[in-house]
Image: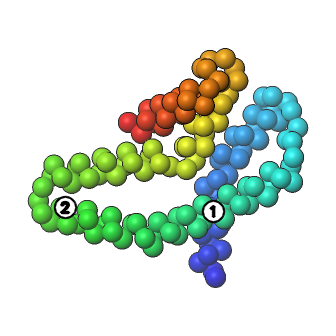
Amino acid sequence: MRNFLHAIRQSAQDLAPIVLVIGFFQLVVLQQPIPNMGEIFVGTLLVVLGLTLFVRGLEMGLFPIGESMAYDFSRKGSLFWLLTFGFLLGFGTTVAEPALIAVANEAAEVAANGGIIAGTEEARDGYALGLRLTVAV
């Protein structure tokens, strides 16, 4: 239980800069009150819990096999395959990163609403994918 509470605290610390930036721009730059404060608070708690469980799942499921594969690649002595594995793993995790997907989708929605891109679902999806790939590379 103590480890879980520590993990929740760590997730909250990881999320804090994002919350602070959003709060700063909402209150100071836009000079608007935060709408639906209760709903946003509950949502933020759910994000912290979800992030905690997600990281724990990675530590239990994917990290051990990744470490084992990296060790096997290095033991095999093939720098090419080790670097290829590292690049593709980094690229894949960046493209599939949940926060990046959410931000890219929101940016596509804002761009469509602002008339920067077409308002079709296909245009928004393409724009969001392009943003994710740009960050990944």
The residue wearing badge 2 is 73
**Direction from residue 35 to residue 84 in the image, left or right:** left
- Asked whether the viewer can see residue 10, the reply is no
Q: Residue furthest left?
A: 77
Image quadrant for the C terminus?
top left
Residue drawn at x 23%, y 49% as measured from the top left? 83
Q: Secondary structure at mark 2?
A: helix
Verify CB contact (< 8 Å) between mark 1 and mark 2.
Answer: no
Name the one closer to the observer, 137 or 110. Answer: 110
| Residue 91: mark | none
84 to 33, vertically: above or below: below
Question: What residue type is disc 1 on?
Answer: Gly
Would residue 59 appear left or right of 83 to someone viewing this image? right
* Residue at position x 86%, y 49% in the image: 37
Q: Quadrant of residue 116?
A: top right
Q: Secondary structure at mark 1?
A: helix
- For this rendering, which residue is in front, 54 or 32? 54
For disc 1, the neighbor class at 10 Å (few under 14, some 14 to 19, many from 20) is some
Q: How is the image coloured?
A: rainbow
Viewer-proximal residue among 107 and 30: 107
In the figure, 133 relative to 54: above or below?
above
User: Type of residue at label 2?
Assistant: Phe
Residue at 60% over, 55% down: 14
Q: Earlier in the sequence, mark 1 or mark 2?
A: 1
Disc 1 marks which residue?
Answer: 50
On the image, the x and y values in percent for residue 43 come to 75, 55
